[in-house]
Amino acid sequence: MMRLVPDGNIKLGMAGTMLSHPGCVREINEDTVAYVIPGDGDPTGRRGALALVADGMGGHAAGEIASRIAAYTVLRVYYELEGSPPEVLGRSLAAAHQAIRNHSQAEPECAGMGTTCTVLVVRDGAAYLAHVGDSRAYLWRDDILHQITEDHSLVAEMVRQGTLTKEEAAQSPQRNIITRALGSEASAEPLVFSEGLPVRRGDVFVLCSDGLTDVVDDHTISETVAHQPPPEACQTLLDAALAAGGPDNISVGVFVIGGSAPVATEMRSTRPIAIREHPS
């Protein structure tokens, strides 16, 4: 088991970037990536930095709408509410789930849409995670890449039960069937880590959708983030997924703790979508 030891400096900053691409096959990018890294003097700074990836589903652009609703809702609610990071992350994902459900009920063409959502918060020397679906979060530390989220998917559950090997799961025609998502079912059941993971200078966090991990292996991810700063690492991983055929939308974010890159506040996706809020 990975042993996480705090750096001792609770004011370590985070720097990084995120990229998203429709891939080589899909016309619409249903992924949304977003991150906020407050600068010095920013009143939101006490809430820490936040990054997320959401991979929508639903067809006819509904997946794109679901993922953007999730991203905007999580960002808004997280920075509005008071409380511990796990508590606020839980309430943020619950609000996103309900917002997607409300939109689906108001817009029949969006019925059944949903999205994965993996959220990283770094605050006061610790990293906090909230997760639903098969997008992933990794931590690279001391030359080892650790997957720190578990996929909520049919084949991942079969691997955990011992009825399928990882190699069989990677080739299974059922590998894209997810068992939990925001919005598509009455209950989302996201996993919110109850405690923070102490961070150290030089730690690298990777957030990504399955459009990356289905075609780029963990060794490549590890070698890339070990030797390249976040902007170049993101581009290299995106290019690797495209070179492998890019059969799905591809999203990746790379963030380093204690990095010297300029801090940023940014959202990246495909295009702006007007989102109307509907009463429940």
Image (cartoon, helix red, strand yellow):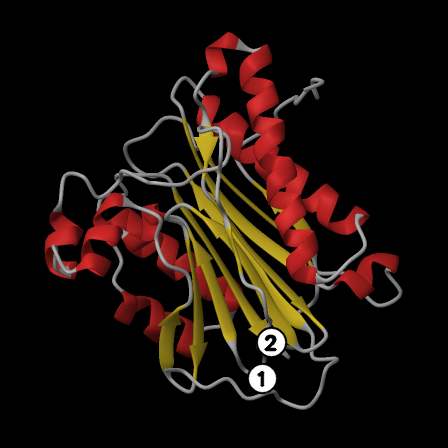
Q: Where is residue 179 in the image (x, y as percent from the top left)?
A: 34, 40
Is residue 120 rendered to the left or right of residue 40? left
Going from the N terminus, do you reach mark 2 or mark 1 first?
A: 1
- Look at label 2 and name its amino acid: Ile
Kindly identify the residue that appears in the image at 33 percent across and 46 percent down. 211
The reply to whether residue 88 is visible in this rendering is yes
Residue 200: assigned label: 1
- Cα separation, mark 2 vs mark 1, equals 7 Å
The residue indicated by pointer 2 is 257
Q: What is the secondary structure assignment of the residue under circle 1?
A: loop
Image vertical order of residue 16 relative to residue 145, above or below: above
Q: What is the secondary structure assignment of the residue under circle 2?
A: strand
Q: Position of residue 169 (x, y in %)?
A: 16, 52
- Other residues around mark 1 within 10 Å, as few (<14) / some (14–19) / many (≥20): many
Look at the numbered discs 2 and 1 and tell me whether their residues touch, using CB distance below 8 Å. Answer: yes
Q: Where is residue 105 in the image (x, y as percent from the top left)?
A: 56, 14
